[in-house]
Each structure stands twice: as C-alpha cells, then as structure tokens.
Amino acid sequence: MTNIGSYDERLEAFCWSIAEEELDYSDAETKNIGWYCSDRICRMGKSGKPALIWEGHDGTMKQYTFNDVRLASNTIGNFLKNLGLKNEDRVCLFMDKIPELYFSFLGVLKIGAIVQPLFSAFGDESLHVRLANAETKAIITQRKHVGKVRRILDQSPYLKHIIIVDYDGKHPLREREIVFNLEESIPVEEFDIFPVNTESPSVLHYTSGTTGQPKGVKHVHYSLISQYLTTKWVLDLQDDDRYWCTADPGWVTGTSYGIIGPWSLGVTQCVLDKGFSAENWYQFIEKYNISVWYSAPTAIRSLMKAGDEIVKKYNLSSLRHLASVGEPLNAEAVIWSEKVYGLPFLDTYWQTETGSIMISNFPGMPIRPGSMGKPFPGIVGTIVNTKSFEPLEIPGDIGLIAFKPGWPAMMRNYWNNEETYQSKFKNGWYIPGDRARLDSDGYFWFVGRDDDVINTAGHLVSPFEVESALLETEQVAESAVVSKPDEINMEVVKAFVTLKPGFTPSPDTELKIMNYIRKKLSPLAMPQEIEFVKSLPKTRSGKIMRRLLHAQEWGEEIGDTSTLEDED
Ligand code: WTA
C-alpha cells in the first residue's frame, strides 16, 4: 500500500491542512523545522531509532539516533548563540557531506538564523560572491576548506566567525577562527529553540541563472508543510525504510529531501560521502539495505554506461522505490532501470525556487516513460503561451510551465533582488522558465529550458528529444544538444556526445548514429553535426550545462560558471 493511495481521490479531497494536522502544526510548541526534524520525532517515541547512517570516503561508518541528532543540533545551536549569533543572521555551511553538516543545518535553524548551504567544492570566487550577497556572519567549515575562506577574508568584513569542526591543533588558528568539536562538547539536553513563525526565513539556497550572478532563494519555516507531504506521497517513505538521497545539501534536493523531508517523517536516512562509481553506489545499497533511492538523471545515465553486468554482482533486492530529479529523465533510462533493477525511476520536477516537488510520477500511477508526470495535489499547474501567458488548450502546443502561486514551500524572495523575483510572475502565474507540453491525460512532457529550445526554420525542436534518441543508440553514453547558427534556417541542431567504452570517434560511428536516430526523429530535429567529446560540462549537481555549449556555438559570453564541476 502506497502512502498516497489513489492520486485522483487525493486530488479531489486535497488541502494543505492534511499535512498541518499530521504534524499537529497548530498546537505545536514551535514552528521551527529544527524542532520538527529532531525533538518532535523523539517525543513520538523514536528517540532510539537511527536517523543517520553515514559512511565516509575511507570506509568509516557512523550511526546516529534521532536523540543524537536532537542533542547535536542543540549543542551546535547553543554554541552559535554563545557567539552572539541570533535570528535572521546568515550562517553558511561549507562542508563535505559529514555528519556535522546535517546537524548544523538543524542547529542554525534552532536559533532562528538563516542557513546558507554551499557546495564545499566551490572555489574562492564562487564562495565569495555568495557570502557577500548574503552578508553572511558565520561559516561552519572543515580544515581542508578553510584556506578558501582565509583567502577571501580581506574582502569579507561582514564575516565575523569561521567555525572549524575538525581542528587538530597542528596549526595556529587565524583571525576570526574558532573551534567547535562535536564529540568533545558537552551535549546540551535542554535548549530554548527560537520561536519562529510560519513566515520566518529558514534556508537560503543559491541558484545560477542563465545570466548574471547567482540568486539567493529565500525559503521560510512553513516550507515544512510541502516538504513533509511530498516526501510522504511522492517518495513514499514509510517507517521501516532505509532512504538514500544522493544529493549534496549544497543543492536544494539535499536539504528539502536530504534532511527536512525524511527527518520530519522520522525515517532513517543513509549518506555516502564518497565520489561516484557504479561499484561504490551498488555496494552502498547492498550494505545498508537501501529501500528508497532518490537520485538524478546524470547518475542514472552513468550507471547505464557502467552496464548491466555489474548490477548482477550485487544484491539490490532491498530497493522498492526509485525517483529522480534535476534534469530530463529520458524514457530510455526509465525503461533501463525497470529492466535491470526491476523498478522504474519515477521522474519528479521542481526547482530551488519551488522548494518542493511540483510535478511527478506517483507511486501506483501508470508511468509514461519520458513524461514528468502530473502536478502534486494542491498544485495548480498548466502550460501558458510564451507571450500572452494565457493557458493553452489541452492537449496542445509547447508553452511555458506555469503554477498558481501560494504553495507552502514556495520561495518568498530572491535575496536583495526584488526585481528579478517579480519578473518570475506573469498574468497571475509563477513561471519557472521551462517549456513543456501537456497531453490529454494531464501528463507533462518536458521540452527544455525556455532558452534552450531550438527554433529551426520556425519549428521548435526539443534538445531533450534529440538527446533521448541519441542515448538509445548503442554508441552514445551522454549527449547534449544545442542550436548553432545557420544562414538559411536561423538555427540548426548540433549534438555533443561522449561514447561508451569500445567505440571510437570516426565518420563511420557518426553515420551509424545518424542512421539510427533518423528513424526516431523528424527530419527537422536531425542534428546537422555530431561532435565527439571526452566529457560534457556539468554542474556540481550533475546537470549537463547545455548553455555553455550553446554559448560556445554562438560566440556569446558564458555568464556564471560557478557551479561547474571541474572548477576547483
Ligand atoms: C530542471 C532542481 C526536466 C528544470 C530540484 C528546472 C528538470 C531546473 C527536472 C531546476 C525534470 C528539474 N525534468 N528538467 N524532472 N527537474 N529540472 O533549481 O529546468 O537546481 O527549472 O532544482 O532543473 O533546477 P534546480
């Protein structure tokens, strides 16, 4: 039995108060997410239940109960409070996926401060622009990353405290640095959690746009309502699950569904702080009996690339539910996962700005591979015309995805950027900036970012469609399709591809690929050129950055590249 039961029945009877009631929201002593993810779970009798099972890159394993999480977040909160930090101050988390990262997230929230998680792999400049934009007062980090903070210190007068969680005493501390050691601290049993209200700011995630500086997306404590219920109904988390969200909390998936969602439900989650390889991942699933797995298409495609044989070496029978987010999930990947794991990856669609899942394939609902699924109950979503922002007929043409504003987890602003925030609303709709179409049964089909759609000779071509076709060939491992300028057609389609092991770039390989996809695509969508590359540019969260390739083809400026994977 799935948590959601019947999607259609939920749709009819839906009200966000369902989540409020399940969480005893109106009677709760505080609306603080920090309390909901630890204290409340202990109070429900689960204090001894594992909350976090963690494995480090060297194989070290640690396990923490919900009571451990409660105490650790109290202790960190108390430490921050004693430093003079208070509600609405921005506190940055700049750590690998170590346990302190997860506990600090709740600790910062417990004092009413705003938590600003950033990828620890960011370089100096990426770190600096985000701290400067938020005027962040404190940063919690590790020895290995403190050098970057030191190098930007002169330009960061607002940054008062640099808290190091793994100081070894070997080198003297520098200006503004202070040590916090969780294991050596006296656990704080009782802590006065800051009495936030529903609209108090909670999390500030930075997201890169197509142009300009990254924007700080401001969320509030009320986001819990959406995050709790979407975790329950879409990820289908149940009391005895072992859940693995592969995302880093530097990305919104790693907080909404890698901390708040599972812990507000009192579910055990597993974290692997180790680089990607098919072996590492399958081993992790087998060792910890992962049952629910939330990942991303690039990872899934990488697993596809690693092949079917390796899957057979591991016992993955604990898996019962798989979901994906972040970029288009090709039909091919859904079909493949069903073949090798016996379970399809269910696609989910949302954004940093939406804070929670907006459109998805629901457990128990027939899947249409390649489709993102249907709106979450309570979310009014449609497709609007790109100029008038009026809803299009259904089924209909490609248009912009649009949502009626007002769900609990929606961003409340971009930090110090009201103008860009306002520009996201048109004709009473929130416009995420993606193109899609709706079929007659209400399933959404992703086409591309608003600025990625290729208009060739007046015909709109979805890069996703071409990429999916390429992925179906036996040669192609990964693909990215962009437009390139053309005198006659304005734009034509160009494909960048990486090849699977055993294939080499050659005119013959190109011909074989072309001959295969010709059968799949309309002649207008056929690439004019296939360029073989060793790797494709990706963001830290694993998304292929088509826009870099697009800019390269058009001779344009690249814009913000701060989340590029290979930047140090
Ligand atoms: C894209 C991610 C296709 C989309 C949680 C969106 C997707 C942007 C999907 C948000 C999906 C996300 N299919 N595209 N299932 N999910 N996207 O803010 O363009 O990092 O607007 O948040 O990723 O990316 P963000």
Image: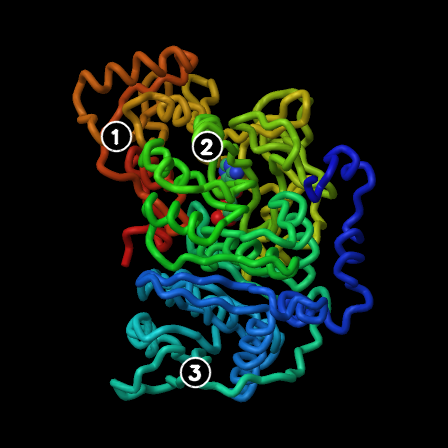
- Left or right of 269: which side holds 502? left
| Image point (46%, 71%), residue name | 100
Query: Of tags 1 and 2, which is closer to the observer?
Result: 2
Q: Sequence-wise, which precedes: disc 1 or disc 2?
A: 2
Q: Position of residue 336 (x, y in %)?
A: 44, 28
- The residue at which mark 3 appears reads as 180
Q: Position of residue 424 (x, y in %)?
A: 59, 46
Disc 3 to disc 1, C-alpha distance: 47 Å
- The residue at which mark 2 appears reads as 337
Question: Which residue is nearer to you in this view: 80 or 133?
Answer: 80
Q: Is residue 487 visible?
A: yes
Locate residue 179: give its quadrant.
Answer: bottom left
Q: Is mark 3 within 8 Å of ligand 1?
A: no
Disc 1 to disc 2, C-alpha distance: 20 Å
| Image point (63%, 45%), residue name | 236
- The residue at which mark 1 appears reads as 499
